Amino acid sequence: MEQAQKNELAKIARMVRIGVIESTHSAKSGHPGGSLSIAELLTYLYFREMNIDPKNPKWAGRDRFVLSKGHTAPGLYAVLAQRGFFPVEELVKLRHTGEMLQGHPDMKHTPGVDMSTGSLGQGISAAVGMALSAKISGDSNRVYSILGDGELEEGQVWEAAMFAAHKKLDNLCIAVDWNNLQIDGELGEVNSPLPIKEKFEAFGFHVIEIDGSDFDQIEAAYAQAKTVKGKPTAIVAKTVKGKGVSFMENKASWHGSAPNDEQYAQAIAELDAVLTKIGG
């Protein structure tokens, strides 16, 4: 990928992170940590990878995306706003009574959301169903999903994975946000789902391991996934929980905590400084 393209994506990812901070600060609740860790993945999917039309969110021929770790809705909302599905000004209404953007994605009220999610394990199951439906109908659209690494502790994830491989759903590409932290601490302290790569391979997936913040690696992984025939693809993306905000990085406590006024100011200042690094 050319440097100019990477810089442009980096700027968008920065705006996604700002959206996460602004929305959770306004709501005084939400899940910033795991939203920040997937900013690059979301940015690449919505600005380079997926065939979508913000002016026609229900277009039948669109690619589908399911945020299986639905609690990181602030990240999804931020990228949807940047992509033009709804005004960026909506982000500060996160979790406000009667508003469009609630704590978990709602496909009935939020443009661009393809599946209501929140109960861990159910998102990938829905994505598998969408991929199977496309196969049965002879449609060419692809289905994408992002799972949390802690989510892999749910048995339903592996039921869905087993079914996806059995049905040879090569139009399905999932990504695992492997930041090694969940709400109660490190994966190894809670209920380790490791080794992730080997498990998905055993369940019949083609598996690609990447640095989930490196756009070159992200681009190569999604390009490779499109060449795979006869099996679904899992991209295991090593990430940093809370990435981009120094005091949130690698801290499980930021899984579901909102920044206060002082923390908000520091986070925005740090994200504003990112522009200097990427030549903005």
Image (cartoon, rainbow, N blue to C red):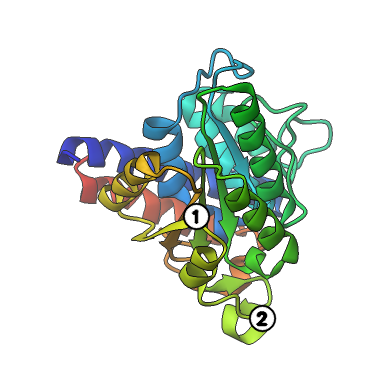
Q: How many marks?
A: 2
Which residue in the structure is indicated by mark 1? 36
Quadrant of the rendering where the C terminus is positioned: top left
**Residue type marked 1:** Leu
Of residue 125 and residue 87, the one placed in the foreground of this image is 125
The image's mark for residue 117 is: none
Q: Which residue is drawn at 70% across and 53% down?
A: 28
Give the x, y percent position of residue 245: 44, 61
Q: In this view, does 31 lie to the left or right of 204?
A: right
Q: In this view, does 190 lie to the left or right of 222?
A: right
- The reply to whether residue 22 is in sight is no
The reply, left or right, for residue 118 in relation to residue 19 is right
Q: In the current view of this chain or complex, which residue is farthest to the bottom?
A: 189
Which residue appears at 62% of the width and 59% of the height? Answer: 260
* Between 201 and 91, the one nearer to me in the picture: 201
Between marks 2 and 1, how big is the CA–CA gap? 23 Å
Q: In which quarter of the image is residue 58?
A: top right
Q: Which x, y percent locates residue 184?
A: 68, 77
Q: Looking at the image, which residue sits at the far right?
A: 97
Q: How crowded is mark 1: few (under 14 residues within 10 Å), some or many (20 or more)?
A: many
| Residue, disc 2 | 191
